[in-house]
Image: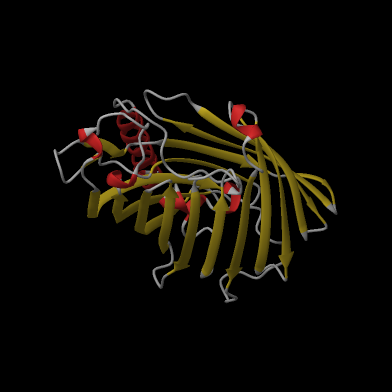
Amino acid sequence: MNRMKFKLNIVRGLGILILLLAAETLHAQQDPMYTQYNFNMQTINPAYAGTWDNMGFLVLGRHQWVGLGGAPNTYTFSMQSPVKARNVALGLNVVSDKVGLEKRLMVNADYSYRLMITEDLFLRMGLKAGVTNYMNNLTEYTGYPGDAPDPVFMGDMDVRFMPNFGIGAFLYSEDYYVGLSVPKIIRNEFRNNYNNFSTWSELRHLFLIAGYVFDLSNDLKFKPTLLTKATMGAPVEVDLTANFLLKEKIWLGAMFRTGDSYGFIAQWIFDNQLRIGYSVDFTTTRLQHFHHGTHEVMVSYEMSSLRRKWITPRRF
């Protein structure tokens, strides 16, 4: 009983802290978005590290609004691994994000600890810590012909090794999960080198993620999922997906992102270790006339070990 009370107090305290952090005033939605977030949750929630039960690696490339100059491009590398301590796992994330002339390189380490709620239900609590290298060559921007030079654009922003940290919780079983996280808590201010013009370049985002797997038959599974992204001062964004797993080998699904886009997802599973995924998005805004969609490719590989014996593939 005392152990259960201790676990519940930890969960309650973490939830209160996340809600308090999310209540602070924020101004924009900035963190990279992913269509294949179901298998890439570690970038936004450190508590996801360790859910694979084995060492694993993931690489993902996202090219947004292909054909539009200066459109966002994001490249992600993630790895996670359990350690000798039974309930502890470590992870690493490297994200390169470019929008126009603005560049971010984010390197973060993850730590998660697993609590057993029941025999089939687990709660992982995670910490994320890392640095960001930010660059924005303001002097290379082109203004309207004939306009006087804008003093704001007379210096480059070049900020290196800006620290940050985040927290998260991830409740899961074999068939469902719920996660809550704030991956960046410190609000970093970036200034240019000319007149100290500043911008809040790293803001707090609250992520709520959930999914459930329904067994429709021996050869067909259905997994609806939800991802909610929120910051104060920006509209709440909700990603809804409907995914079908065919014969434990192929995921096929569709996605809708409120106020932004819809898309389609496919993933192939090889020997329950290697996964190759592809998704394409089509925006619902006026930008749809100026680009050729958003394309995302993901490859992940899970090392074999004695910790997990594959009977069926991971569902998330």
The vertical placement of 304 against 129, above or below, is below
> How many numbered marks does the figure carry?
0
Q: Residue furthest left?
A: 195
Name which residue lies at 53% across and 68% down. 56
Q: How is the image coloured?
A: secondary structure
The part of the image, by quadrant, that contains residue 160 is bottom left
From the viewer's perspective, tell me whether residue 223 is left or right of residue 83: right
Q: Which is more toward the observer, 294 or 254?
A: 294
The vertical placement of 268 against 209, above or below, is below
Name which residue lies at 57% across and 47% down. 37
Q: Position of residue 196 (x, y in %)?
A: 15, 39
Q: Which is more toward the observer, 153 or 79?
A: 153
The part of the image, by quadrant, that contains residue 261 is top right
**Residue 11 appears in the picture as rendered:** yes
Name which residue lies at 21% across and 41% down. 154
Q: Position of residue 268 (x, y in %)?
A: 73, 61
The vertical placement of 118 against 11, above or below, is below
From the viewer's perspective, tell me whether residue 131 is left or right of residue 215: left
Q: Which is more toward the observer, 191 or 10?
A: 191
From the viewer's perspective, tell me whether residue 213 is left or right of residue 140: right
Viewport quadrant of the N terminus: top left
From the viewer's perspective, tell me whether residue 223 is left or right of residue 30: right
Q: Position of residue 289 (x, y in %)?
A: 65, 33
Q: Residue furthest front?
A: 146
Name which residue lies at 60% across and 46% down. 67
**Residue 89 appears in the picture as rendered:** no
Q: Position of residue 267 (x, y in %)?
A: 71, 56
